[in-house]
Amino acid sequence: MPAEMRKRSFVITAQSRVDIVLKYSRDLVVALCVVMVFTTVILLLAGAPPLAAYYHILKGSLGSWMRFGHVIKTWVPLTLCSCGLLYTFRIGLWNIGVEGQVMMGAIFTTFVLRLGIGSQMPMIYLMGSFCAGIAGGAVWALLAGYLKTRGGIHEIFGGLGLNFVAQAVILWLIFGPWKRVGIASMSGTELFPRELWLPYIFHIRLSVAALVLAIIAIIVTALMLRYTKIGLYLKALGSNVNAAHMFDLNPHGYMLLAMIFAGGFAGLAGSVQVSGVYHRLIPSISSNYGYLALLVVMLANYSVWLSPAVAFFFACLNVGSIQLPMVLQVDSSLSGVIQGALVLAALAVHGWRLRTQRVEVEWTHE
Amino acid sequence: MSEVHITIVLAGVVAGAAPILLATLGETITEKAGLINLSLDGTILLSAMVAFAIAYETGSVIMGYLCAAVVGAVIAAIVAVFSIHLRQSQVAVGFVLTLMARDLAYFLGNSYSRIQGPHVTPEPIPLLEKIPFFGQLFFNHNIPVYLSLLLIGVCWWYMYRTPQGLNMRAVGEHPMACFARGVDPKKIQMLYALCGGFFVGLAGATFSLCTKPGWGRPQGAEGTGWIALALVIFGGWHPVRAAIGAYLFSFLQAMGIYLQGWFPSIPAQVFQVAPFPLMIFTLLIINVVQRESVITWGERKTWARSLLGVFSGTMPTALGRSYRLD
Amino acid sequence: MRIELRDIHKHYGAVKANNGITLVVEPGTIHGILGENGAGKSTLMKVLSGYIGKTSGAIVVNDTVEDYRTPAEASRLGVGMLYQEPLDFPPLSVLDNFVVGQAAGIKNKQAVFREKFDTLVRHFNFSLKPDDVTRRLTVGERQQLEILRLLSLGIEVLILDEPTTGITAEQKESLFRALKQLAAEGKSVILVSHKLQDAEALCDTVTVLRGGEVTGSMKAPYDANVLLEMMFGTPPASPSRSAVEYGTTVLSMHNVAGPGGRTGLSNCTVTLRRGEMVGLAGLEGSGQGVFLRLAGGITKPTAGTMELSGRQVQGNDLHSFKKAGVVFLPTSRLEEGLMPGMTITEHFALRDNDTGFLVRWQEAEETAQTKIRKFRVMGTPISWVESLSGGNQQRLLLSLLSKESMLLLLEQPTRGLDVESANWVWWHLNKYCLRRTTVVFSSSDLEEITTVADRILVFFEGRIVMDVKKEETNVNELSRAIAGKF
């Protein structure tokens, strides 16, 4: 290589993962400050005292063991969904259908649990219902995947359409075949007998099994993405699907696989909602956790270690704002506003950083 | 069914389609210039709330409309700024905004829930409404509906018959080439994002002041933003075809209400939800139609060719992509 | 209009793409900027045309120092550029492409511009129709359109960046005629090229760049040896080929047709044998890319049969082609060959054929180290591939291939590479031929093809129109076939 060329080479090397997470956490702190200001303004607009609002959110989420149990109850399905989304985000898919996948998992779970009413071995049915939930979510996700790979419909629209369908199916079931004895109502199906509830610690109403499931999900996902071929292939296809042929990768196959993973985790979240939280099927069984999980993963910068932490923070916000209508006469959607604002602020800070540290690599094409 | 009955149903379809049409046309403009505004659903809700609140406080429907349109433009501007100046993903920002705007609408609109407020008055056009059939169909509505009808033609003319419209389409195809020619893609994308957002705001106001008057949680407009996005694709990024899609959707909704009577065992909510996935799955038809194999099949049959031609529309090449001007 | 560039610097971080360049372009002349790929010519012209900003230095137009930052400002001063990659709008019509950037406002001025267009087309004797879709035009025709547009804007200084790549000899004649006409009318023309013969045929003055700096300039008539020395320092060695015996049939196609590119491919019947080095000649988009992708299993044929080592394969999926040892390397290395955002090590991890479930990171890193050394890639195992230069990306891609490939299909393997990297590529590919691998490559450089290939296939409008051994033909005959005269 000629001498002049040698001194003109300029390569960028990958930073260590710890480095990336640390730098990003710094951005998050800045984002948090910005959002505090914004939320305060919004609260004033709604005529509510800001400091009181923050206080009640804090107290409402972490103020007692019972409330903390609620936070964990929210954290588990949220984290499960987030783990699943890490797979689809890695391959570059926008799995908006995660809401429907949670719902389908809940439907399948309810089906199996209903079979187990009055049985002598409720544990079998409980475990079976979890498997059914995973299957339900996976099937629903696979459907959205096929709509994309065979039908050419973008996964956002396919997922959305299937969300609507899942919602319609739940409504039909609650008002039709699975309706309560007497009058069908929006409060859902008949409550399941105690033995079909996920076992929990009485005082704080916290199910250890659910907690363990979430932790296992996190660890499995972290290992899968970092150390397995599947994780590497997902990353490669997410980077450049046009180069898939170079490495004999089948993009459609891995997209469907990622969807199956995402749907499976989401379905599991649905199972937890039915057997561990509500103990029946209700119209809003997904509690918007699917959409919220998308925000969680975005805010966590698609990192498997930051996601549970962000999910915890979001869970606190959700549970804490339940108090607000009662004590301050404001709607509890404030948590949604804060969560959305946080993601936007993080994106803004990230974008601002990009502006100030642009590295030129375009000279390579002469 | 008597003839009068059909006319009333169809007139209802035209009226009901007005807000969806406004949103779809607005998004068609934005996407033709290369920007995706995924925040439509939330924007419609937020602008609906603002329209109602402002109209309630000031007593003026026009003020409500104006403020709602401004809200729509502001949210679209946020998407544009994040994309153009901060180079973040349009899909990501749009998605976050759709959730956030909805939550903001519910939060700030809490005190306006389920109360009576001002709404748009019917304004039949004096002579034209007497025309049999078409008079009832098109000329016996209110101003927002007339506006939506007018806008179809205006959009088409602007996009395909003016130099400004040509520049807009050029930016959506190849922003860097526009830069090389002195047409500033950043300014143009921002302009049409604002414009599109303005119309989306009008759509929201039409919901809360005209089609489904009032505010609540839920309002009834939930989901239409997503439909509008699907309709833009259905319409092949062409205002007239997108309008056809909007009327089709409104027709499906009308049918849903009608069919409820025939199947009393199925809960009403199912019929309310059904048009949404149906519309999205029409995208399947569009994709099948654009397949190579179908095109080669239709090549020899002239009737098939023209039919397929109606359905094909190409995506603006630079849609959703970020670019860098040095 | 007189243009003077004074001490122009353009730095990208630590890289000095232009390092203090000074030159003068007189009005009414054709000025050539000569240099091999990577010398800094395109960068300099992009600075002059306002497409990118300069780090330091001055541009003087008619004795006034002008400081412009955008192509719009440059064209207002009369400086316009024809870029190497066409900056136009394929889905829009020719007339629309002509108009964009010239008209504003709401009033429809199509008729006015249609007339302007017709006048200019006749003036230069081009054959462009205003209502055609730009996507269907050849590269040469798109160039013509762009020149007309720039002239319509009133450009006085026309810069052309590598205009003769990918156009027929006839279109080149037409272009050179037009340029000479422009110079005679008092306009200035700047021609950027790495081809000596173009500069010799057309230019009044030539400035040579190497490594971001001016190494010399000369007025016509030229001494080729002097120019070559200014361009390369020491004259480059030309790629050598050793005689090879051909073996059994590797790939055969009967009446194969397939979609893609500008024209697709139809009625393709050809047989390739082991050890052959086959060059695909023709205008860009005449079907070479489609041929390579069909042979590589990337695209499925819509008609005909294909056999690989005697077995029928048309309609098979990519995996069976890969197993048989067929590899395809695309032109756009970053867009279709590598994964941006991933490191060299990760690419070798992707390449690992081990059937386990887990990634063997240790092995991948070791392989990366070894290959980086062996192929002399300027990078480290943890470098992001998008930060490597074009030549290094090509070396990396070649290093990712296995030694036991049966059929190598390369699209424009030396595009954008400096001479030393290009020579290295041919030396490396030659070794494959010696090992009885068949190498098929496409190129828009006829000289390269005739130097390197044993056998040449000429493509025109989606068909193979000529299939000859190198010894049985010459450059003239090939040029005529490329242009469609056979």
Image (spheres, coloured by chain):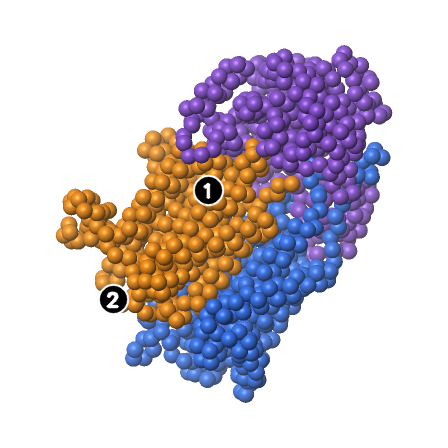
Chain colours: A blue, B orange, C purple
Residue B21 in picture, x, y percent from top left: 35, 49
On screen, residue C425 above or below B196: above
Residue lying at the far left of the rendered structure? B2
Residue A318 disc label? none
Q: Nearer the viewer, residue C214 or A199?
A: C214
Q: Secondary structure at mark 2?
A: loop
Q: Report the residue marked by disc 1.
A: B32
Which quarter of the rendering shows the C terminus of chain B? top right
Classify 10 Å Cα crowding around label 1: few (below 14), some (14-19), many (20 and above). many
Q: Looking at the image, is mark 1 or mark 2 nearer the viewer?
A: 1
Residue C146 horizontal side relative to residue C378, left or right: left
Q: Which mark is residue B264?
A: 2
Mark 1 chain? B
At label 1, the amino acid type is Lys
Q: Chain of mark 2?
A: B
* Front one among B15 and C49: C49
Figure quadrant of residue C3: top right
Same chain letter for marks 1 and 2: yes
| Residue shown at 41% from the left, 24% from the top | C111
Q: Residues within 10 Å of mark 2 (few under 14, many from 20)?
A: few
Work out whether C63 lies above or below A195.
above
Q: Residue at x 21, y 47 (%)?
A: B125
x and y percent of residue B40 in the render? 44, 55
Which residue type does callout 2 highlight? Pro
- Kindly state the secondary structure of the residue where label 1 is placed: helix
Q: Inspect this view and state whether residue C137 appears.
A: yes
Residue lying at the far front in this picture: please name it: C64
Q: Tell me: residue B215, above or below residue B148.
A: below
